[in-house]
Amino acid sequence: MADNDRLRDVAEDRDFEIGAAVAAQPLRTDPAYKKILRNEFNYVTAENALKMGPLRPDPGVYDFNDADAVVDYARAHDQSVRAHTLVWHNQTPEWFQEWDYTPEQLEEFTREHVHTAAGRYRDTVDTWDVVNEAVADDGTMRENLWYETFGEEYLDDAFRWANEVAPDTDLYYNDYGADGVNVKSDAIYDLVERMLDRGVPIDGVGLQMHALHEKPGIDSVAENIRRFKDLGLDVEITEMDVAYLPGDDPGDQEARWEKQAEFYRDITEVCLDEGVDTMIVWGVRDSDSWIPNWFENLTGDPLLFDSGNDPKPAYDAIKDTLANYEA
Ligand code: XIL
């Protein structure tokens, strides 16, 4: 591996997709951001632009500006696209939260939303997170409005509607805190198995891998991936970032970044060992990360590039693993 090889080149040599979550704003205004994105990553997901809230400012209105900006940029730079997400309890429009719908209206609204969004990108998006975070941390079904109205078959409908308009797009269930084998991933395993039994067109399971308050054990992640693959499903690492609580933080930046790099290395090795060919990090530079805005007790530098646009040890660890690791 030559030092000037880009991460995406090393990934492509190995048929691997290394991705980043992207925001529309810096994509329009920040040349350094764009340069890293197009040079280093061969897979892109929209961090917010394809969520229902940003997409649906008013009843009956779609605003595809930001989503199109992300998808068009990716296509122009030969990057695959993961779209996130069609049905999720968070980041729904305010007007929607206040809407006093009947079950029929909610079904019609959701079908129309899935058909419109997934249909628009049928030829430009490779993968959709059809349903995000439908299982609660204790392994019960999350009591979101779709579950309360329709029961768990709301997932079946969402996947079928997406498949109707985007038959060539890979359709994923995506969740956090289910990276290793635990009560939540057990429940997700049972859920997707029931969906497969019902003939639902699901292609894969996304493990978000927000390694924040607790880090999953590496062997447990491997075992978890294997069991989903044994069901015939694909697995992708979809939203990775690595941060530490005070007691867990080595203290100085250099030591923290080394520790972080080791975790990124471990997960990359698990991917190569278990036939997972996609790993996405949840942002480009540390200054782009959602972590400082959401978790004030966590270290705020969870990504592969620092806030001055320079690659960190985690970047080198992934690149070295992709270039040299023998699975
Ligand atoms: C986060 C975004 O990064 C933030 O910008 C936004 O304010 C909230 O959502 N799991 C998911 C992602 O599936 O959509 C979330 O993204 C992070 C957790």
Image (cartoon, rainbow, N blue to C red):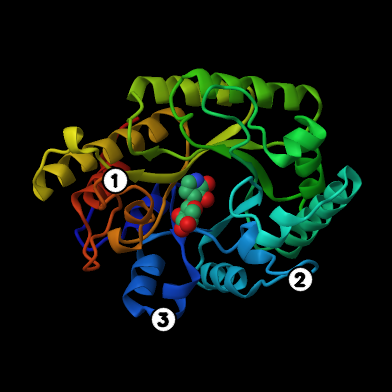
**Residue for badge 2:** 61
For residue 33, which quarter of the picture? bottom left
Q: Nearer the viewer, residue 46 or 77?
A: 46
State the separation of the CA atoms marked 2 and 3. 26 Å
Q: Residues within 10 Å of mark 1 (few under 14, many from 20)?
A: many
Hey, what amino acid is under mark 2? Answer: Val
| Quadrant (top left, top right, bottom left, bottom right) of the C terminus | top left
Tell me what residue is drawn at x 63 percent, y 60 percent: 53
For residue 58, which quarter of the picture? bottom right
**Residue for badge 3:** 29
Hey, what amino acid is under mark 3? Answer: Thr
State the separation of the CA atoms marked 2 and 1. 41 Å
Give residue 258's position: percent from left, percent from top.
15, 42
Indicate the secondary structure of the residue bearing disc 3: helix
* Left or right, residue 39 beside residue 98: left
Is 178 situated above or below 10? above
State the separation of the CA atoms marked 3 and 1. 28 Å
Res 98 visible: yes
Tell me what residue is drawn at x 39 percent, y 57 percent: 283
